[in-house]
Amino acid sequence: MWRWGTCTSHALIRIAVVDRGRMVPMAPVVDALGLDATGRPLPLWIAAWADAEAQRPWPPMQPA
């Protein structure tokens, strides 16, 4: 978000499209929306966040 030429905030949002209780792979969603699937390379800080998310246990473990 920008205000008067200054960045005030930004966010990364993790979402998934689900069907019948399961995540739908990205390719069919992109096709259904008529979007370009080629995309562009992620900035390094976003790629690092995605790598860290891949290591996070899911569902989270209950506290003892």
Image (cartoon, helix red, strand yellow):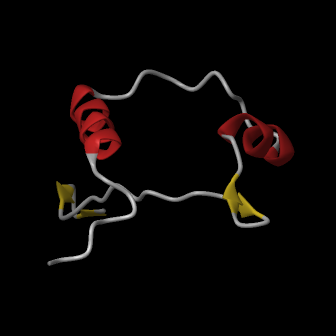
Who is closer to the viewer here, 62 or 9? 62
- The image shows residue 23, relative to residue 25, as above or below, that is below
Say left or right for 16 vs 44.
Answer: right
Who is closer to the viewer here, 17 or 61? 61
Who is closer to the viewer here, 15 or 11? 15
Q: Residue at x 73, y 34 (%)?
A: 27
Who is closer to the viewer here, 39 or 16? 16
Q: Percent x, y for residue 18?
A: 70, 61
Q: Residue at x 71, y 49 (%)?
A: 24
Say left or right for 35 vs 23.
Answer: right
- The image shows residue 58, relative to residue 24, as above or below, that is below
Q: Residue at x 21, y 63 (%)?
A: 9
Q: Residue at x 69, y 58 (%)?
A: 22
Identify the image quadrant of residue 23.
Answer: bottom right
Q: Percent x, y for residue 26?
A: 67, 40
Q: Percent x, y for residue 20?
A: 79, 66
Q: Residue furthest front?
A: 64
